[in-house]
């Protein structure tokens, strides 16, 4: 038996121009040479068209072509071809004509039929064909075509408009049934560019409706059942259609013979749409409900069918229970899918109140915090609603991201004793350590049953932060214990962390503690692991990325910091929650300040002021507050943050002035004093750092740096001490600050060798890819043997004053509203005019020139 690619069926409208030639080159030519040809294929696969082509070829060869249904071969005297289409419907008279033709040496027979039905008359006739012409017969089996053939036909019909994407769409819509492929291509050819492939063309819709109406009642019922979602399973279809099991196989064969049912058990998509649209909706609903019951009774989980019922707003308790069950399973792996399933469950009759908490959880995990608040609030507002504890936990996590930690603590209490750790954490962050301790103790005393990984992790977070708050002259360094506890909490949460909605993540808290004490390597490691394992899921990802950006900024890797900030914004589509927005704007301010980009700093400061207003001060936002304090001093706008600083100091006082958390804020105050060149304002911060240095190595480093900077501001510069302090800052993760200290000292020192050492130190503490070191001009070596040519202009004097102060070209440009390149040109001309041969010589001559002018 030979299997050939299917030609086009006889369909209304134009055919592709080259289609007939392609067919004649293949099965038609081979069929014309045989005495008997048997063609078999479902409806719409091109049997009639193939018979027409064979008949035409015989006519061109001079043979008489007869239709066995209407013409008698006995009336023909010469050679003839007897054509039998739809042989599965042949009468006894037609079969008799075929047999007589087979016995005649003048005759050729071409016979086509569907694979089903196979009546006894057809079976006998095919047996006679095999017996009469055993060695000179040809068989062709037609069927649905593949995507490559569809693309070939599309190119023949549409030319350049036949793109691969269009071929994919046509093949997917038609299932490769040739009649439908050419019907759709004909529609595209008639109205190029104006046919929406998602809509069945009107002409094709009418033809499909007629074909479906022509089916016998039971075959159409079976095709409809499959279109409604039934599998091609004998047991299911028998029960669904009330058909004896032994008859189901015949019905399935009859359905396949229509060409509308594909090999994988699906109905051709365009036919499915027309069939469902032309069948009364109540009939389809009844079929689907009955099908769902049959499948559920068999122990199956027909989620797709249940979702279809939900889409039609069919209320069915079995569908609702099934969707709810699968939604619970999906919450851990695919929260978006869980939300869809829960919504569908409501559409099929599940009580809204019973699902509100889970819908809130799914919404929060997918980043829809407004939706999460609505659903959680609905559950909490109904005292009879189940799962209110879950709703409280979800709402607590959302409010924490929005800066409402006090309210989050209350909700964590409502969520139950297993969330006591999160409640205590929120209380600690807002300055209520005694209440947090009582809450944890009460929860531990009343806990019964095995704790979950989530509850243990929450307890460890509260314990770690409590440990970080310990301070005093007799206390040991709390950092190692706090970091150890928090990193254990993060590791414990990893297996279930993607679906954990928390007040904060243990990775973020570990990083904050590590940042407070200069352990940038530890902070970066734990955060990167959290990003890699998706700890906390989508809601926590921006926070982890922004803290990584903060580390990069402190280390002087400005480009990397910006990459991480952009990635964090992309997670939420650019709109961050208040807590994350505060960190983002503080990063923008910090990067602009460190790059000496005054216009960018001013713009970032405006946005940062709004972010500060939107988020109250708490323990976990002291880091961005400190950065903004420094920026405010740089812009001479320190009064704007005075109330926030007062609130922060009161918070720390309620917590017992923990050195770990207070030290960075004092360091920010010291930097602000340094920027304003105010030794008096620097002294109290330096004193606080010195007091903390007795128990904190990090505070000792900052205290020494503050003391050294105070000496630099008062021109009591000891270059070796400056280098040591700057390198210590670099080792503590504050490379940019160390570089700035060395740069400032270099700008003030008069000894050329000391200046060279200090500038070299400044350069080594920043990432070369991010520009010049603070306090360094960054210019290349001066030209040899310059010659003095005159005094300085007023603009050059302005530039000279800032150069002597140790400002970079970018800082000077920002102050004077000129470009850094223009500043470089001014410096070069000043070097030429003053006859300076080295940088130190230039600085000395500039000081003398400015003093003389004064």
Image: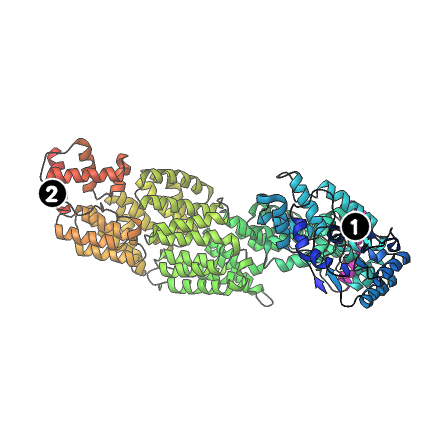
Residue projecting furthest to the right: 93
Q: Quadrant of residue 218?
A: bottom right
Whether residues under marks 1 and 2 lie with C-beta atoms below 8 angstroms apart, the answer is no
Pinpoint residue 852: horizontal percent, then vertical percent: 10, 35
Q: Residues within 10 Å of mark 1 (few under 14, many from 20)?
A: some
The kind of secondary structure the magenta stretch mainly shows is helix
The residue carrying mark 2 is 836
Q: Is residue 348 visible?
A: no
Give the spatial CA distance, label 1 vs label 2: 94 Å
Q: Nearer the viewer, residue 540 or 561?
A: 561
Q: Quadrant of residue 192?
A: top right
In the rendered view of the protein, which quadrant contains the C terminus?
top left
Look at the picture and state if 56 lies above or below 252.
above
Q: Which portion, as a residue range, is magenta?
A: 276-299
In the rendered view of the protein, which quadrant contains the N terminus?
bottom right
Q: Nearer the viewer, residue 723 or 300?
A: 300
The residue carrying mark 1 is 284
Look at the picture and state if 737 lies above or below 471.
above
């Amino acid at each position: 038996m030979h299997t050939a690619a299917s030609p086009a069926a006889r369909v209304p409208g134009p055919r592709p121009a080259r289609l007939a030639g392609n067919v004649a080159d293949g099965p038609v030519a081979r069929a014309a040479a045989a005495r008997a040809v048997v063609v078999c294929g479902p409806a719409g696969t091109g049997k009639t068209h193939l018979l027409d082509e064979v008949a035409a070829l015989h006519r061109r060869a001079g043979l008489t072509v007869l239709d066995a249904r209407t013409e008698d071969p006995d009336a023909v005297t010469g050679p003839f071809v007897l054509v039998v289409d739809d042989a599965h419907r042949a009468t006894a008279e037609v079969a008799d004509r075929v047999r007589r033709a087979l016995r005649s040496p003048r005759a050729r027979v071409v016979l086509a039929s569907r694979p089903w039905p196979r009546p006894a008359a057809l079976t006998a006739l095919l047996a006679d064909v095999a017996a009469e012409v055993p060695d000179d017969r040809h068989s062709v089996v037609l069927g649905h075509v593949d995507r490559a053939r569809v693309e070939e036909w599309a190119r023949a019909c549409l030319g350049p408009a036949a793109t691969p994407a269009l071929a994919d769409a046509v093949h997917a819509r038609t299932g490769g049934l040739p009649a439908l492929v050419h019907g759709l291509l004909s529609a595209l050819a008639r109205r190029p560019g104006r046919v929406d492939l998602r809509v069945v063309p009107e002409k094709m819709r009418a033809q499909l409706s007629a074909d479906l109406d022509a089916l016998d009642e039971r075959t159409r019922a079976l095709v409809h059942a499959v279109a409604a979602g039934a599998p091609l399973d004998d047991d299911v279809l028998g029960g669904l259609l009330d058909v004896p099991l032994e008859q189901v196989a015949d019905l399935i064969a009859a359905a396949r013979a229509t060409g509308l049912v594909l090999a994988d058990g699906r109905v051709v998509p365009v036919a499915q749409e027309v069939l469902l649209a032309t069948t009364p909706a109540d009939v389809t609903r009844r079929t689907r409900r009955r099908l769902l019951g049959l499948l559920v009774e068999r122990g199956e989980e027909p989620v797709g069918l249940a979702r279809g019922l939900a889409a039609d707003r069919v209320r069915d308790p079995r569908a609702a229970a099934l969707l709810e069950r699968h939604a619970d399973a999906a919450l851990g792996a695919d929260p978006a899918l869980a939300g869809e399933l829960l919504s569908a469950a409501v559409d099929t009759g599940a009580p809204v109140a019973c699902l509100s908490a889970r819908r809130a959880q799914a919404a929060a995990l997918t980043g829809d915090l407004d939706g999460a608040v609505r659903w959680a609030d609905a559950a909490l507002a109904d005292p009879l609603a189940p799962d209110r504890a879950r709703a409280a936990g979800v709402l607590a996590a959302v409010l924490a991201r929005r800066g409402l930690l006090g309210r989050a603590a209350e909700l964590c209490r409502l969520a139950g004793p297993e969330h006591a750790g999160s409640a205590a954490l929120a209380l600690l962050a807002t300055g209520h350590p005694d209440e947090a301790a009582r809450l944890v103790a009460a929860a531990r005393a009343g806990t019964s049953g095995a704790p979950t990984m989530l509850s243990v992790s929450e307890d460890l977070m509260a314990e770690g932060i409590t440990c970080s708050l310990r301070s005093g002259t007799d206390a040991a360094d709390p950092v190692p214990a706090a970091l150890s506890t928090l990193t254990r909490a993060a590791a414990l949460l990893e297996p279930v962390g993607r679906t954990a909605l928390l007040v904060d993540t243990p990775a973020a808290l570990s990083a904050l503690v590590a940042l407070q004490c200069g352990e940038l390597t530890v902070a970066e490691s734990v955060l990167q692991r959290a990003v890699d394992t998706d700890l906390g899921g989508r809601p926590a990802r921006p926070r982890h990325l922004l803290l990584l950006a903060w580390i990069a900024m402190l280390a002087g890797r400005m480009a990397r910091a910006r990459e991480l900030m952009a990635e964090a914004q992309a997670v939420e589509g650019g709109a961050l929650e208040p807590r994350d927005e505060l960190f983002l704007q503080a990063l923008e301010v910090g990067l602009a300040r460190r790059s000496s980009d005054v216009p960018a700093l001013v713009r970032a400061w405006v946005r940062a002021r709004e972010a500060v207003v939107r988020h109250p001060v708490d323990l976990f936002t002291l880091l961005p507050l400190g950065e903004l304090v420094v920026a405010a001093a740089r812009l001479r706008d320190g009064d704007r943050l005075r109330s926030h600083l007062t609130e922060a100091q009161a918070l720390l006082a309620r917590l017992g002035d923990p050195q770990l958390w207070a030290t960075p804020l004092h360091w920010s105050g010291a930097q602000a004093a340094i920027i304003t060149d105010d030794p008096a304002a620097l002294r109290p911060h330096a004193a606080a750092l010195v007091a903390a240095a007795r128990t904190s190595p990090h505070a000792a480093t900052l205290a020494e740096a503050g003391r050294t900077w105070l000496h630099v501001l008062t021109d009591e510069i000891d270059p070796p001490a400056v280098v040591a302090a700057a390198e210590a800052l670099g080792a503590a993760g504050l490379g940019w600050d160390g570089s700035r200290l060395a740069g400032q000292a270099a700008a003030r020192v008069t000894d050329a060798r000391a200046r060279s050492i200090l500038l070299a130190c400044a350069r080594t503490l920043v990432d070369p890819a991010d520009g010049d070191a603070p306090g360094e001009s960054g210019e290349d070596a001066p030209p040899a043997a310059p010659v003095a040519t005159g005094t300085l202009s007023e603009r050059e004097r302005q530039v000279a004053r800032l150069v002597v102060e140790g400002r970079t070209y970018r800082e000077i440009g920002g102050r004077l509203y000129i470009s850094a390149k223009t500043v470089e040109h001014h410096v070069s001309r000043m070097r030429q005019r003053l006859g300076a041969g080295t940088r130190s010589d230039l600085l000395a001559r500039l000081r003398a020139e400015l003093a003389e002018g004064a």
